[in-house]
Image: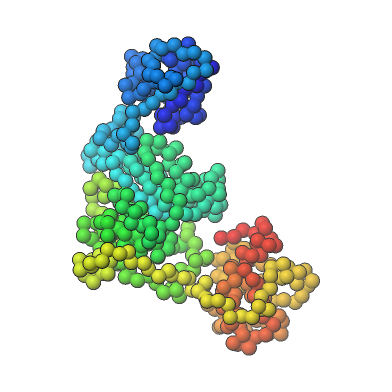
Amino acid sequence: MNVVIFPDVLARVAKLPAARVEGEGRTVRELVEGICEQHAALREHLFYGNAQIKEHFLLTANGELVDVDSELAPGVELDIMLATSGGLDVDELSNDEVRRYVRHITLPDVGRQGQLRLKKSRVLVVGTGGLGSPVSLYLAAAGVGTLGLVDFDRVESSNLQRQVVHGTSTLGLPKVESARRRLEDLNPGIQIHAHDCAITPDNAMRLVGDYDLVVDGTDNFGTRYLLNDACVLLRRPLVYGALHRFDGQMSVFNHQDGPCYRCLFPKSPPAELAPNCNAGGVIGVLPGVVGLIQATEAIKLILGIGEPLVGRLMRFDALSMKFSEIRFKRRADCPTCSPSRTDRELQVEEPVVCASSQMSESTLPADFFVSPRELQLSLARGEKLQLLDVREPNELEVCRLPGSLNLPLGELEARLAELDRERPLCIVCYGGTRAERAAQLLLSAGFTGLRVLQGGIKAWARDVDHDMPLY
């Protein structure tokens, strides 16, 4: 029995079970031919039609070059080496690539040269969630030669409703690793660089600087402004997308002296207007629509065709199934992209904290708080507690404590009459912060006998009801 060691890329393209494959044969040819019989896709990559091995492979055994007719002793390992330049051969398309991308190549605006541009391009996708999933899938399928993926999160079951690059088999894995596996299966001929980290002021310039174009699949204002600033300083186009519930936004920033993100939104919204971090929600198909438009814009920029969304904010309303567009211009006084800007330092935006969670250290005495287990015992004893849940109604669709009354925090002051002042009251929210705010409001309104569930519904699920779904 002998072992043949194939290059990793050849093993992937030929769909071998592993890079090391066992086989038998008296000569190199017999050994390799036997493996080709078991794995038919291997033959076309190794041999020409005249049964000669292709010249970009070297055959070695015991540290010596051998040819296809060399004899092999039992137990000898045959190492098939592929000529390499340290990266992709970006100067031409192989016949396999022409076959794969034929529907592109026959387009008048693409052709072979356009497909080569895609092959030579390097695109950074920041975020491998709802938007990053369709973006990365379609850029990989299109033949973008190098894809960088940035994300610090791990795959959870609640992601799978919209983050289609991941699957049940990769639950718990880092998202960039999960995405890398799927994209390599989709197109083994491209390079995937997985950056398992967040974008920060310390790494933004290095990460952005390694790529030609950036696609924004982030979900927070701080990272978005940081990306925008790095792209302006490094003169990289930024393809923007954003989601909320049933609405999407798309645009292209920093391209051909066009406006940047801060020209459109000079400041992030205040806390009281920021979408609720826990209750925002998004319909699962929306990221697909927005992400595909982002991928389309990225491909147009690489190919240099069409009219990109520069100075145009495209809006999509899924409920009415309507697209609309707002035109905007570069701001002469923009602190990020103004020609008068002289510094080269990143501008770090203050993080936006959702109003529902914006609170300093608790001002309530320690005896106001009740642990999940203590509350469970009180309910089991039949104590006449009022359970007040101050979350938004849509949050209660996921999980709630039985018998709780829902008065959202924003409506509580106007609905105090619905509460029984004679009964003790336990206030509940998702993490505890909104419940504390509600307790302070009720105290100022003269309520007594108040308790707050420490850690909120999340703590209840952790300590009491382990099967309770969270969001």
Q: Where in the figure is residue 23, as x and y percent of width and height?
A: 51, 18
Name the residue: 47% across, 45% down.
177
* Total tally of numbered discs in the picture: 0
**Residue 205 in the image: above or below residue 43:** below
**Residue 289 in the image: above or below residue 33:** below
Name the residue: 32% across, 64% down.
346
Q: Where in the figure is residue 156, as x and y percent of width and height?
A: 55, 52
Image side of residue 241 versus residue 34, left or right: left
Q: Nearer the viewer, residue 418 or 75?
A: 75
Name the residue: 55% across, 70% down.
392
Q: Is residue 160 visible?
A: no
Q: Which quadrant, please, contains the C terminus?
A: bottom right
Q: Where in the figure is residue 173, as x and y percent of width and height?
A: 53, 48
Q: Where in the figure is residue 174, as x and y percent of width and height?
A: 50, 49
Q: Which quadrant, please, contains the N terminus?
A: top right
Q: Nearer the viewer, residue 56 or 414?
A: 56
| Among the 4 quarters of the image, the one containing residue 193 | top left
Q: Nearer the viewer, residue 355 or 122?
A: 122
Q: Residue furthest right?
A: 381
Q: Residue furthest front?
A: 63
